[in-house]
Image (spheres, rainbow, N blue to C red):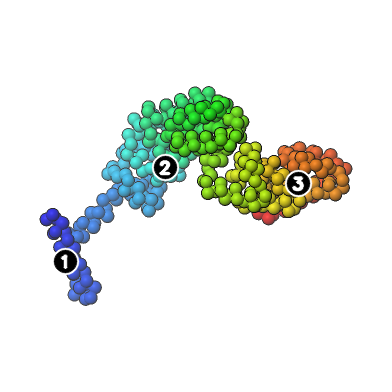
Amino acid sequence: MMFNFLFRNLLHVHGRYANLALLNPNKFQDFSCPIFVKYISTNSNEHSFTVSYLINSCGLSSESALKASKIAQFDTPEKPDLVVNIFKSSGFSETQISDLIRKSPKLLLCNPEKTLLPKLEFFLSKGVSSRDLAKLLCRRPNVIQRSLKNQIIPSFHYLSNLLQSSEKAITVIKNSPCILETYIGPKIDILRYYGVPEAKISTFLCHWPHSFLAKSDQFKEIVKEVKEMGISPLKIQFVLAIVAKRIMSKSHWEKKLDVYKKWGWSDKEVLAAFSKYPWCMIASVDKIMAAMDFFVNKMGWDSSIISEHPLLITMSLEKRLLPRAAVIQFLSSKGLINKKINSLTYMFECPENTFLQNSVNSYDEAPQLLKLYQEKLNSSEKAK
């Protein structure tokens, strides 16, 4: 209490003299308050060594170094030097080390030989290259701060056993380092409970590991919702639907639902399209509008046809739909192709080589068709 009283009075006195100095600088030019100046000086230089080290040895900017010094402070370079040297010897570039320290300054305070080196050696021993390890840790520095015995090793072994491959486990970790910090067991059990085969679970985890970062209750709710849509857990569409629902908010779902309804789709048709190809609901509103406008207004198709072929919604207008449409319209004008809708949709959906072989090169007009096709492709490239 006494200190607070004295300190407030000190500030009050200092403030009065400072104000007088502003009014009459010549008279008060020698004014100083030693105690106050000492306090400011001590506070501003408290972590000067840390800041200097972070700038000169770790390559941080002055601003980043100052911010980092509030999280990690040290008075000597011995331990930080060991940490930096271990990263260098493990194949990290200076830029990567700088990035890593900027994101996680506390790494410079760790015991490098007991806590840092064993973790790096573990990843390297499992086949993670130095280059990939550096990228992984720069993306997610928290991983290296997790317990090797209680978190990293058990998580890696769980993934390896689940996927029946250390290589696949490494791929998953590189794609989503956070997976090592998350207990995914309950979510795997949920998928099994709803009848998703092990092979589909592995595919799910390998390609979309971020979906497993959801809370178990939220994940379960999504899986249950997809099951109630009537999508079979035995099909890959079940997994794709979970991914789609996981990354899309309810408001975005409703917004896209309204867009499809504006083009004449019923709720049943939207559900049918989503069940066939869940990515049709991930497409942006602008993409959906552009695709529907193209097929309904340019090609003259009924909008219900698109609900039966939802893959068409996600195709690039410039790189696929417009160039192929030019070829289709040319062949149609010459009476050279079957105008049945299934034949036409296949011409849009088939792979590039198949399209060129069946719809361009197999006709006498091949040179003209190829030129037309290339012109449309080139014009889309120039339009970027």
Residue name at image x 32 percent, y 39 percent: 109
Q: Earlier in the sequence, mark 1 or mark 2?
A: 1
**In the rendered structure, are the residues bearing label 1 and label 2 in contact, judged by CB atoms less than 8 Å apart?**
no
Foreground tag (1 vs 2): 1
Is residue 64 shown above or below 198?
below
Report the amino acid beneath label 1.
Val
For mark 1, give the secondary structure.
Answer: helix
Residue at the spot of label 3: 324
Mark 2 or mark 3: which is in front? Answer: 3
Q: Residue 46: x percent and y percent?
A: 26, 51
Instruction: Residue 209: give x, y in percent of width and height.
Output: 51, 35
Which mark is first along the chain, 3 or 1? 1
* CA separation in Å, label 2 and label 3: 48 Å
Residue tagged 1? 13
Query: Looking at the figure, which quarter contains the N terminus?
Result: bottom left
The image quadrant that residue 34 belongs to is bottom left
Q: Is residue 80 above or below residue 302?
A: above
- Whether residue 374 appears in this view of the structure is no
Q: Residues within 10 Å of mark 3 (few under 14, many from 20)?
A: many
Circles 2 and 3, Cβ within 8 Å, touching? The answer is no
Residue 228: percent from the left, percent from the top?
Answer: 56, 35
Name the residue located 31 percent from the left edge and 41 percent from the top edge. 77
For disc 2, the marked residue is 100
Q: Is residue 7 visible?
A: yes
At label 2, counting other C-alpha atoms closer than 10 Å, the crowd grade (few under 14, some 14-19, many 20 or more) is many
